[in-house]
Amino acid sequence: GIKLRPYQIEGVNWLVQCYEVHRGCILGDEMGLGKTCQTISLLLYLTKKLMNKERFLILCPLSVLSNWKEELERFAPGLSFVTYIGSKEERPKLQQNLKEQSRFHALLTTYEICLKDAAFLKLFNWAALVVDEAHRLKNQSSLLYKTLSEFSVGFSLLLTGTPIQNSLQELYSLLSLIEPDIFPREQVKEFVEYYQAIEKESEPAKELHNLLQPFLLRRVKSEVAAELPKKVEVVLYHGMSALQRKYYKAILTKDLDAFESETGRKVTLQNVLIQLRKCVAHPYLFNGVEPEPFEIGDHIIEASGKLCLLDKLLSFLYAGGHRVLLFSQMTQLLDILQDYMDYRGYSYERLDGSVRGEERHLAIKNFGQQPIFIFLLSTRAGGVGMNLTAADTVIFTDSDFNPQNDLQAIARAHRIGQHKPVKIIRLIGRDTVEEIIYRRAASKLRLTNAIVEGGQFALGAPKAQGAAELQLSEILKFGLDKLLASEGSTVQDVELENILGETKGGKWVMDVVLPRKEESEEEDTENHMYVYEGKDYSKEPSREDKKAFDQLLDLQKALTEETSKEGRALRNKANALLTGLQEQSTRRKHLLSAEELEARRKKRQEAAAKRARLMEEKKKAKAEAEHKKKMAWWEANHYTSTCLPSEESDSEEEFAEDEAGLNVDLDYEDADMNCIKYVMGDVTYPKAEEEDAIIVHCLDDSGRWGRGGLFTALEARSDQPRKIYEMAGKMKDLELGGTLLFPIDDKKSRKKGQDLLALIVAQHRDRSNNLSGIKLSALEKGLKKIYLAAKKRNATVHLPRIGYATKGFNWYGTERLIRKYLATRGIPTLIYYFPRNKGSSSASQPYSS
């Protein structure tokens, strides 16, 4: 069955309520919060309520069909469903089987099959229609929208992590599909006009929130899934090779007439934009650029500034044990990247729009189950509905104009089921169209989020954004001032570890707060290759960019006129003229006086101290929040920890007082002073009189109870050790140095006194099941805690001969710790050697069962 989280239970209840009042709805939870399992829970409820008499239709993209199938089989084995797919020749037979088969609860199929076989699917009366990734229905004029409007449906449920991506019109389209009587299709214009002032005025926004609340439920990860690992985005800027810069200029100057009239030549300008983006990605995307004989080599890397940076980045990630989702909007670039992967010997899978359904499923399955380094994905085809939490790093080689598409892609890794922090890395060409596309998308996303926060639903910004909408010709001019300043390569080396942060054991370390670039001196950052997200970007070409473009335009016109007069010869001088286009001298830096240098030093020290203080406060707040969250989790699971407290505060002071009262040479072999008693017998039946006895056992932090030896002996004595230890493992209550203490008198007990077991977590077991030796630092922490517990109870302590017959075990160091923290502090301490003749083992006191 399904074990739902609290917010998912709330979501299912909301869906049930919508069904009960016959109101279609949109579940718009952020990607990765489990919309699928909430929907399956609803279908299970409806199946029982409708007494198995009704049927449900589930539509989804082909890329997530296998995921839906697996989730239905996993969470709802009692729900019979049919996966309706196949070739044109196969489907008629399947249709006949469905007509003859009177009982099935749900039919699962894709958008495309639904369109092709709409006539057949219209024959059924569907109790509920579920449409996954429903932003596909944002256009009322689309064929899929019109087709679904004609189906006989009792209740409609739309699932989308991005309910609105661009406009109020898209929002109305979804509302009109689920409730056509309340939101008639012909009234879309009035709706948009009435609420279009939502960005500037609070009253329409509030009114719209109230209107939508019954139809749209939206929750985000930061609010309802705080246990998810952190997600951090880093932007890496790269230069261009000389070859790229040459082609970039050539593309701009090829059709300068298009810049004269925005409306008349918009298609041409759009094509110029596409070509510029290809150029920034890799010049080999153009025919005839790659040198013959077309053999793979270093040239594929050196030709592109983006691939130079990516090559260093992947080497860094591979060495750190990370796994990567690599997204691009261009499948041709994926072809080049695939050649690169083969050249470097990196293991990879690939998924784009051309990959068939079964191959998609196999690629996703392979990446999840095998140690494959990289998954190559197209942003549109690979950014929808898939679960790829095996990766902890997401790389975008290019950014989408619509930031929601990139968010969909990020959610493939950062979602429920992810146990590692996730790093999102964007590669952006400095001073190119890529930079302004990213800046505009980031600005658009901030605007969307500002509107979203007004209520529990998502609302994108209207398309008409006034001054924020630049003309296409202005976008193409961005960065020209610096681009035309030189002819050579602008590719630079970067210190990736300093930029991306620390990585340990295949995980990103997220605790370090990286310095923000805006805190540095302006002259130190002006030409830097990278920045972190959060810097206040301008979103339009500078005055210098426009001036450079005008110069380029004038020069090209002059070249055209001269060429017509003097023929082909002058054309060869174009590169020389372009090189001399910019003669601007670099601005000299102001030389600082001694007083100014001292002031800057103090300012930086103050800033560093402030950052350190904020880091400490943030670290403390984080620890408190994590502790609070853990306590709430334990309470929800009715778990009470048996761990002894750390030797801190009052306990630490008590320990220190005892330490001060001792002046013992631990190497002095005086039996009376060190008072460890070595006995033959079974430590699970301690030789104790009337006092309490604490039995000590060392184990690892895996939460998996062992077999044989003391593990089996303890199970024979009591049911508690295994039960308590394994539950502590499930509750994440096992850490090195931690010590569980609890009674074990449930099966056999002494007439007087109580037997307790202290489990010290002194070993670490990794994911590959490799077990470390006993860590003396962890053992030391555990013995300190046992000393305080034994002193409080006036108890004796009983240990097996730890590490007996273990090659290389440091018994001398272990014995010193036992003496130091137990025996020399007056705690009666016994170490047991188990006799070979098991029959000779006996306890000094009788035990009753």
Image: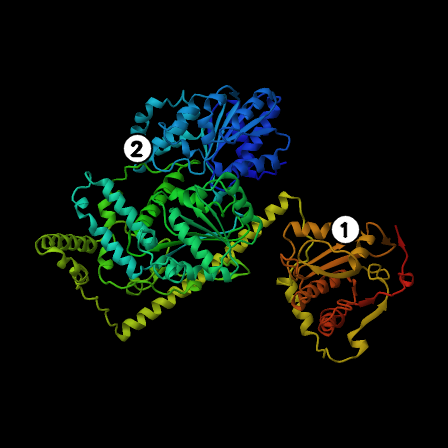
Residue 479 visible to the viewer: no
Q: Secondary structure at mark 2?
A: helix
Identify the residue position indicated by label 1 in the image. Answer: 720
Identify the residue position indicated by label 2 in the image. Answer: 196
Viewer-closest of 581 and 692: 581
Task: Residue at 28% x, 65% y: name it.
Answer: 523
Percent position of residue 345, x then y? 49, 59
Task: Residue at 71% x, 63% y: name it.
Answer: 788
Q: Is residue 789 left or right of residue 264?
A: right
The kind of residue on which mark 1 rests is: Gln
Q: Quadrant of residue 707?
A: bottom right
Task: Residue at 61% x, 28% y: name it.
Answer: 80
Percent position of residue 281, x then y? 34, 53
- Relative to residue 661, is residue 7 depicted above or below? above
Label ID, residue 735:
none
Q: Quadrant of residue 46?
A: top right
Viewer-closest of 1 and 841: 1
Percent position of residue 183, x then y? 38, 23
- Relative to residue 121, is residue 132 depicted above or below? below
Viewer-closest of 761 and 594: 761
Q: Secondary structure at mark 1?
A: helix
The kind of residue on which mark 2 rests is: Gln
Residue 557 visible to the viewer: yes
Q: Residue furthest left?
A: 565
Characterize the local packing of mark 2: few (<14), some (14-19) or many (20 or more) Cα atoms within 10 angstroms: some
Q: Quadrant of residue 803?
A: bottom right
Inter-mark Cα distance, 2 to 1: 65 Å
